[in-house]
Image (spheres, helix red, strand yellow):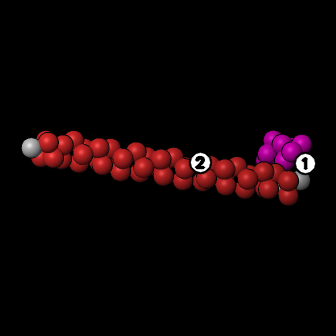
Amino acid sequence: MVMAGDNPNHHQFNRKILWWSLVGIAILVGICWYSILLINQKVELLSAPPPSSEVMVTVSS
């Protein structure tokens, strides 16, 4: 009887673990993607000419 009573709760617990693991994976993927985008932006800034010339070009155009 104890096992039969515990089974529904155990199933809910497993579902919670699955849900939180999916949420955690989504957060990790988001952080990784965000950091990759930031690194790409920094690389573009480093390889680009100084920002003052960029500002002049955008203002003149």
Quick one: label 2, few (<14), some, or many (20+) residues within 10 Å? few
Observer able to see residue 59:
yes
Which stretch appears magenta? 50-61
Instruction: State the CA–CA distance, disc 1 to disc 2.
Output: 29 Å
Question: Quick check: 47 above or below 55?
Answer: below
Main secondary structure along the magenta-highlighted residues = helix
Q: Position of residue 43 (x, y in %)?
A: 79, 56
Observer able to see residue 60:
no
Q: Secondary structure at mark 1?
A: loop
Q: Which residue is mark 1?
A: 50
Q: Residue at x 30, y 49 (%)?
A: 14
36 displayed left or right of 2: right
Q: Residue at x 86, y 45 (%)?
A: 51
Q: Position of residue 23 (x, y in %)?
A: 43, 46
Q: Which residue is mark 2?
A: 31
Callout 2, which amino acid? Ile
